[in-house]
Image (cartoon, helix red, strand yellow):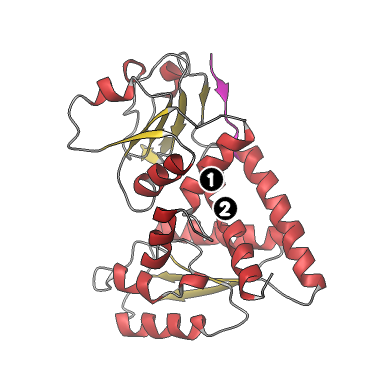
Amino acid sequence: MSRILDGKAVAASVKEKVGAGVAELKEEGISVGLAVILVGDDPASKIYVENKKKACEAVGIKSFQYVLDKSTSEGELLSLISDLNGEKSVNGILCQLPLPEHIDEQKVIAAISPEKDVDAFNISNVGRIMIGNFDFLPCTPAGIIEILDNYNIDIEGKNCVVIGRSNIVGKPMAMLLMHRNGTVTVCHSKTKNLAEITSKADILVSSVGKANFVTADMVKEGAVVIDVGMNRVGGKLYGDVCFDEVANKASYITPVPGGVGPMTISMLMKNTLTAAKRQNGR
């Protein structure tokens, strides 16, 4: 039976360090602020935003919330972002995705100042991640690296397979593993002989978004398995990985819930603190 990678415990450790960093800045008269924008009334997005507010309160970061009607125009949203870019009390800006169909997500992401882009979605920050010269990392891939580091799981020289090529998880995850000298293969919906590729992975990261997609026959004996999936089926939460059967083969595995999920918000807090330090010459 594999060892559980406890994301909840690692996230608590990250938040503790962030809280200490925020307190240090406060002693110098510097407050840390995060602005979160929600457009519309998507139930899942509302929960995420509320969780981010609670996380801010826990570490001493001031939370600015902007809840806009779903009929808000693209111009109105861009105007708000422009104002927040110039607001000194706001160190990080996050616009909760997805946005209503009439608003261009890429235009909105591009409008957020790279120095305040704590999601690291802005094209400038994406480019910096590519070359390995970055201030911020996308929160989920950064959280996965944090978990691996916490459990002293070495990436160098390992065969790493990432299932999923999204801009938020799959692509940046591949880059971070490469920066740590992993040999990386990215698989996706058009990949042929998927199980043949995944079964050779020393480190397998699944962000495909399908419940119980990864089965035991797709996993190498002793592999480290990271499950990014958050799939609701009949009111219950499932990961991408068929946990019970894969746990018998893997050396380490993240559970769902309690694995990668808690790391995402804790890394957002870390990015916001980093932004505040950079903006204040620290």
x, y percentage for residue 53?
59, 63
Crowding at dot 2, Cα within 10 Å, few <14 / some 14-19 / many 20+, comes out as many
Q: Is residue 185 left or right of residue 140?
A: left
Q: Give the labeled residue for mark 2.
A: 267
Find the magenta span and give its range: 1-7
| Helix, strand or loop status at disc 2 | helix
Residue type indicated by callout 2: Met
Does the rendering let one see residue 53?
Answer: yes
x, y percentage for residue 126?
39, 60
Q: Would you say residue 155 sits in the magenta stretch?
A: no
Residue nearer the viewer, 164 or 236: 164
| Residue drawn where x is 24% and y is 68% of the image | 101
Q: CA distance from mark 1 to mark 2?
A: 6 Å
Q: Would you say residue 2 sits in the magenta stretch?
A: yes
Q: Which mark is residue 88?
A: none
Whether residue 48 is situated above or below residue 246 in the rendered picture:
below
Q: Which mark is residue 143?
A: 1
Q: Is residue 280 left or right of residue 20?
A: left
Does the rendering let one see residue 73?
Answer: no
Q: Is residue 74 left or right of residue 269?
A: left
x, y percentage for residue 96?
42, 64
x, y percentage for residue 70?
34, 73
- When asked about the image quadrant of residue 158, the answer is top left
